[in-house]
Amino acid sequence: MSKLDLSLSNLDLLFPDDFSEEKKAEAKTIFLKELALSAHRFYGGKIMTFPKAGIYGFNWFNIWYTPGVSSVSTAIRDNNDASYEFSNRGNLVAVVTDSTRVLGDGDCTPPGGLGVMEGKAFLMKYLGGIDAVALCMNSYNSKGEHDPDKIIDFVKMVEPSFGAVNLEDISQPNCYKVLDTLREVCDIPVWHDDAQGTGCVTVAGLINALKVADKSIDKVRIVLMGAGASNTTIARLILKAGADPAKMTIFDSKGGLHKGREDIKSDPAYYRKWELCEATNPDKIKDIETAMKDSDVLIALSSPGPDTVKQEWIRSMAKKPIVFACSNPVPEIYPFAAKEAGAYVVATGRGDFPNQVNNSIGFPGILKGALLARARKITDEMALASSYSIAEFAAKKGIHPERIMPSMDETEVFAEEAADVAMEAVKNGVAGIKVERDDVYKTTLRDINETRAIIDILMKKEFIKKPDIRLLENALKKAIDSVK
C-alpha cells in the first residue's frame, strides 16, 4: 500500500509482482471502478454551477437580476444573436443522452448516464475551457419504446440556451436519425461524440500509425470489427481521408457488411450501415477470420474483451500490423497479447496503456473551435481537420510505435484543434462570425489555463476537499482480492 498516492501515477506498480500482465490489467480495471464509486460518493458528483461575475456590493444584485437585467432580455429579444454577448451561451454545451448505450453497459435508464455526462462536462471544462450541462432525458414513448423523435424534440426545445449540443450514449439505430436530423434543423452545432468524436481521434491515430509502419492509407487493407455508431462513422471518415473502399471490410454481429445483406437493406433505420454495405467489401467476405488474412489494419469497437480479438487473427495479418482495440472498459485484446501475436502498433481507449485513442483528446478542442466560430454545424470536413490537427501535433513532437497520439496533458493540442476547426468552419461557410486562427488559439489556451488556475486555487484552499487515502486503499484491496 505504500506505493499508493493521490496522483495515481504509478498504477502498474500497485499490484503484486507475481501477477501476470493479464491479472494486472484486470486488477487495474476493478481498482478504477471501485475507486470511481467511492470518489463520486465522496464528492456527490463532480460538477457544480458557479458565478463568473463579481459582487462588489449588494446593489449589484439589481444589475445581475431585476430591474437592470430587463435591458438584457429586451436586447436579446430584438436580436437573438446578442445572447452570445450578454450570456454564457457562446461557451455553453448541452451534453444530451437518453442513456440507452452507456459505455459498454447498455441501457442504464435515463439517470444512469449522469456519471458519464458529468464526466464529459468535467473534461470539457478542464481540457477545453468550456462550460457544459449534463442533460439525461427520457426518450420513452407511450408504447414504452425509445423514440428518436423524443430526443430530437428535446434538443430543439433547449437549443436557445446553448451554443452547441453534444449527443452521447444513444443506441443505434436511433442515434443516426437523431444526429442527421438535428444537424440540419438546428442553428447551432449538434455533435455525436460516440460517433464523430471517436471517428476523429481514430483517424488521427491511424494517420500516425500508418506513418510509423511506412504504409499508405489508399493501399492498406482495413478490417473494422463492430458496426455501431462509432465504427460506421470511423469507416466513413477513413474513406473520406483516402482509404480504398474495395479494401475495407466491416463486421457486425451477423457477419460482413456487403450488398447481399438484405436484413440491413430492408430496415430503413439502418441507412448508414447500408451505405457502407454498398461501398465496401465487394468480395462479400462473410467471416472475420478470412478478412483478417493479409490485412494491414484492424479497428475494433465491439464487445469488451479481453479475448474478443484472437491472437491467431493478428498472426495472419500482413507485416507490421496495426491493431486498434478500443472497447471500454476492457479492450477486445490487451496490448501485451496483441504485441505477443506480432502487432506492430497497438492502441486502446484506455489511458493506462500506450497509444490511448479516446474522444477526450478530440471533443474539447473541436467544440471550442465550433463555439468560437459560432458555427451552425460541424461538417465532416471540420471533423477531419481536427484529425489532421491531432496527428500533426503528435508528429511534430515525435511518433513511434508506442506513441502515435498526444496525451491529455499536452494542453496546446486542444488550442491547435480549436483553431484548425474554426478555420475550417469559415472555409465551409458555416461560421456565424469571422475569426482569425491566432485569436482562436490564444482564446482557447487562455480559457483552459484560467480554468486550471481556478481549480488549483480551490484545491489549495480546500474548497475542493482532498479524498481520504483510505478510499484508494480500500479500492486497491478489493481489486487485488478479486483477481488472486
Image (cartoon, helix red, strand yellow):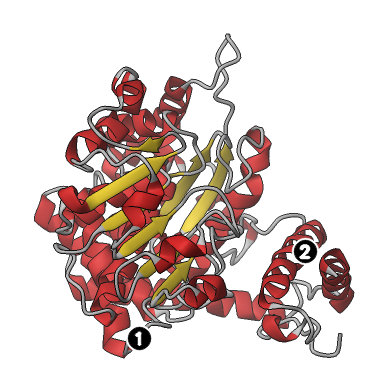
Q: Would you say residue 85 is visible in this rendering?
A: no
Label 1 vs 2, first from the N-terminus: 2
Q: Would you say residue 457 is visible in this rendering?
A: yes
21 and 135: which is toward the camera: 21
**Quadrant of the image for the C terminus?**
bottom right
Q: Position of residue 2 (x, y in %)?
A: 85, 90
Q: Amino acid at mark 2?
A: Ala
Q: Amino acid at mark 1?
A: His
Residue topped by disc 1: 400
SS for tag 1? Answer: loop
Q: Position of residue 165 (x, y in %)?
A: 41, 44
Residue that lies at the very extreme toward the top in this rendered image: 143
**Are there few (<14), some (14-19), or many (20+) residues within 10 Å of tag 1?**
some
In front: label 1 or label 2:
1
Residue located at (42% from left, 74% from top): 343
Residue topped by disc 2: 39
